[in-house]
Image: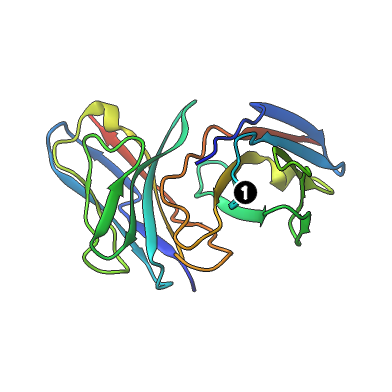
Amino acid sequence: EAQVTQNPRYLITVTGKKLTVTCSQNMNHEYMSWYRQDPGLGLRQIYYSMNVEVTDKGDVPEGYKVSRKEKRNFPLILESPSPNQTSLYFCASSTGQGLTGELFFGEGSRLTVL
Amino acid sequence: DAKTTQPTSMDCAEGRAANLPCNHSTISGNEYVYWYRQIHSQGPQYIIHGLKNNETNEMASLIITEDRKSSTLILPHATLRDTAVYYCIVRPANSGGYQKVTFGTGTKLQVIP
């Protein structure tokens, strides 16, 4: 089954404790992206990757890092989480070519930073 | 990327057609219009997309004005399960076009029994 898998789905952590949210897709998609969703602010793009070793900032990259060493994985790293990073996070992937290019989203990871 | 403007919320009676508008007045000639919806806090789900012709699939119809500055998503017979937030976005049609994409806040559609 084609899917985007995020882990963990739920996490409560404390300020400053490094954490990684993993994202994996099994569709051989070139494009992957991270979004955060906060009440009243919609979905905002954090980082995206056009392919392996190619990443770029979205609208709200501060406080986050990403890497794309393999095509299927695109982890989101919070080196020193802060309470303002409490949010619902979504990973998405898409084929980089062709006219369809619909985004496939993961189920989300709800992060709480105390 | 062109930005889109959508109403914050809309109501629709169950069984009636839901018409969700979207303005994208700065859309470029090579940009598609895409619609997604998000039920509760699940990951957004693709609905439909189009360039300049009207499109229809099993979920919805997409009507794009001739000048391409606005579009309307039509759910022909809304059900309670269509209650969701609907996002309209634009993206380039060429390869690797997603890049930096803003979803905005979308339209909260409430289907009323």
Q: Quadrant of residue A64?
A: top left
Q: Nearer the viewer, residue A52 or A91?
A: A52
Image coords of residue B75 (percent x, y)? 78, 47
Q: Nearer the viewer, residue B36 or B92?
A: B92
| Quadrant for the C terminus of chain A in the image | top left
Residue placed farthest to the front in the image? B29
Give the colour scheme shown.
rainbow
Residue underneath mark 1: B29
Residue drawn at (46%, 53%) of the image: B98
Image coords of residue A84 (percent x, y)? 28, 27
Badge 1 local density, few (<14 within 10 Å), some, or many (20+)?
few
Left or right of B17? Residue A75 is left
Image coords of residue A78 (percent x, y)? 20, 42
Residue drawn at (74%, 37%) of the image: B20
Left or right of A85? Residue B76 is right
Residue B112, visible in the rendered structure: yes
Left or right of B73? Residue B35 is left
Residue drawn at (27%, 65%) of the image: A52
Question: Label 1 marks which chain's residue?
Answer: B
